[in-house]
Amino acid sequence: MAAGKSSAEGVKPVADNRKAFHDYFILEKYEAGLVLTGTEIKSARTGKVQLRDSFAEVEGGEAWLKNAHFSPYSHGNIWNHEPTKKRKLLLHKSEIEKLFGKVREKGLTLIPLRLYLKNGRLKCEIGVCKGKKLHDKREAIQARDQDMEARKAMRQRNAGYRED
């Protein structure tokens, strides 16, 4: 199921992967559940999750989230979880097969874009991504700078026409 509706009620952001939007073109987005232990979900509810260098992979007909850092739960005991272990993503079989087909294509990878709580359950938004080249990143930075300058000019122009 392609995740396009994120403005639903009961959605609380937990972690974003801003670096993914800078380093990759996002071609498609999917919503997946996660298989977690008790201390992992408690850590996620407190927002102690990082997605910076994480990625997703399809192995043996199952999707896995790798290298995502779930900090150990502060009130956990000797059975606290390992921070960067691989975690199973819950997707339909047809979605996994579709993702596996896309990943086999040259230059495409699965990157977790964000984690959020939806109706009490932790969800992961996965993007099918293609890496940006250095010149693409420069163009994005240049476009962002031009947009900021245009907004600043409009604010200054509108500030001069105020009638108080």
Image (cartoon, helix red, strand yellow):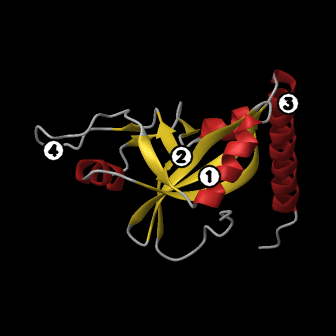
- Residue 76, disc: 4
What's the distance in space between the residues labelled 3 and 4, CA to CA? 44 Å
Residue at x-position 34% and y-position 56%: 45
Which one is nearer the viewer's eye here, 121 or 73? 121
Q: Of circles 3 and 4, which is in front?
A: 4
Q: Of circles 3 and 1, which is in front?
A: 1
| Residue at the spot of label 1 | 96
What's the distance in space between the residues labelled 3 and 1, CA to CA? 29 Å
Q: Position of residue 157 (x, y in %)?
A: 88, 56
- Residue 145, disc: none
Amino acid carrying mark 1 in the image: Ile
Q: Are marks 4 and 2 in contact (CB under 8 Å)?
A: no
Amino acid carrying mark 4 in the image: Gly
Chain-order first, disc 4 or disc 1: 4
| Residue at the spot of label 3 | 136
Chain-order first, disc 4 or disc 2: 2
| Residue at the spot of label 2 | 63
CA neighbours of label 3 inside 10 A, class few (<14), some (14 to 19), many (20+): some
Which one is nearer the viewer's eye here, 7 or 90? 90
Chain-order first, disc 3 or disc 1: 1
Q: Are marks 2 and 1 in contact (CB under 8 Å)?
A: yes
What's the distance in space between the residues labelled 3 and 2, CA to CA? 29 Å
Name which quarter of the figure residue 74 lies in: top left
